[in-house]
Amino acid sequence: EVQLLESGGGLVQIGGSLRLSCAASEFTFKNFLMTWVRQAPGKGLEWVSAISGTGSYAYYADSVKGRFTISRDNSKNTLYLQMNSLRADDTAVYFCAKDAVDTGYFYYMDVWGKGTTVTVSS
Amino acid sequence: QSALTQPASVSGSPGQSITISCTGTSSDVGSHDLVSWYQQYPGKAPKLMIYEVTKRPSGVSNRFSGSKSGNTASLTISGLRAEDEADYYCCSYAGGYTVHYVFGTGTEVTVL
């Protein structure tokens, strides 16, 4: 069964940093675009960032551009999100998601992890 | 990178049909057929219900159907059941200057 498991969430102070990980299993990880999506408490889903299968191309929402860096290690089947200069409005559950088509580009997200919670507080 | 517009809430009685709209622009919903829909229960991860506007993944009930006209996509739930009570989000690929996904604002479905 295809699985995604996020980790690395926690409580961090405003201005601090955190690195999230997403361990993938049971599919050819390097072939698929991977995405981070977040959901603030009581709010809707927000696309955060995506990275092509090879890792050559990274895409960011305006709200995190310049502060967050997405990366992947295809030898470890793991996706990362390095979050710097964290703000209170970055508080959310962060989900990683796999794209559905093995071209390494955007189609739709067919498998999601359960999420990891990030709380940014003073 | 503006969110797609969905009604905040939609309700219906068991057995009825409801439709959730998702309005975007010619840069996202209107420019291609990469619109998907997700169901989310509180505290859970989203689940794919519809992809490429009209297609259903294996295991998703045929009571769920999707369509699109111009810049607006729609999700219809027929034969409404108590278990359909959840939040629903549309999502579209958005090309152009900055390639990205864009989600809808979300719709809370209530079964009366």
Image (tube, coloured by chain):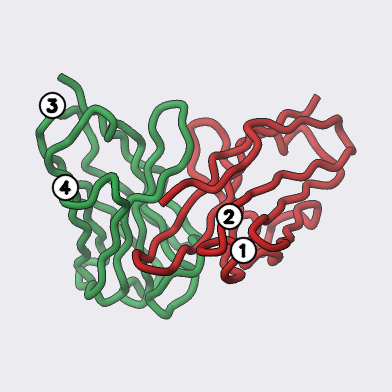
- Closer to the camera in the image, A88 or B38: A88
User: Mark 1 against mark 4, which lies toward the viewer?
Assistant: 4
User: Mark 2 against mark 4, which lies toward the viewer?
Assistant: 4
Label 2 vs label 1: CA separation? 7 Å
Colour of chain B as rendered: red
Is there one chain holding both mark 3 and mark 4?
Answer: yes
Q: Is the Cβ of the residue at disc 3 closer than 8 Å to that at disc 1?
A: no
Quadrant of the rendered image containing residue B12:
top right
Chain identity of mark 2: B
Q: What element carries label 4?
A: loop
Q: State the residue position of label 4.
A: A67
Q: Is mark 2 on a helix, strand or loop?
A: strand
User: Mark 2 against mark 1, which lies toward the viewer?
Assistant: 1
Is there one chain holding both mark 3 and mark 2?
Answer: no
Determine the residue positioned at 60% across, 45% down: B39
Is there one chain holding both mark 1 and mark 4?
Answer: no
- Amino acid type, callout 1: Tyr
Is there one chain holding both mark 2 and mark 4?
Answer: no
Q: State the residue position of label 1.
A: B51
Label 3 vs label 2: CA separation? 34 Å
- Amino acid type, callout 2: Leu
Colour of chain A as rendered: green
Q: What element carries label 3?
A: strand
For this orientation, the residue located farthest to the top is: A122
Q: Is the Cβ of the residue at disc 2 closer than 8 Å to that at disc 1?
A: yes
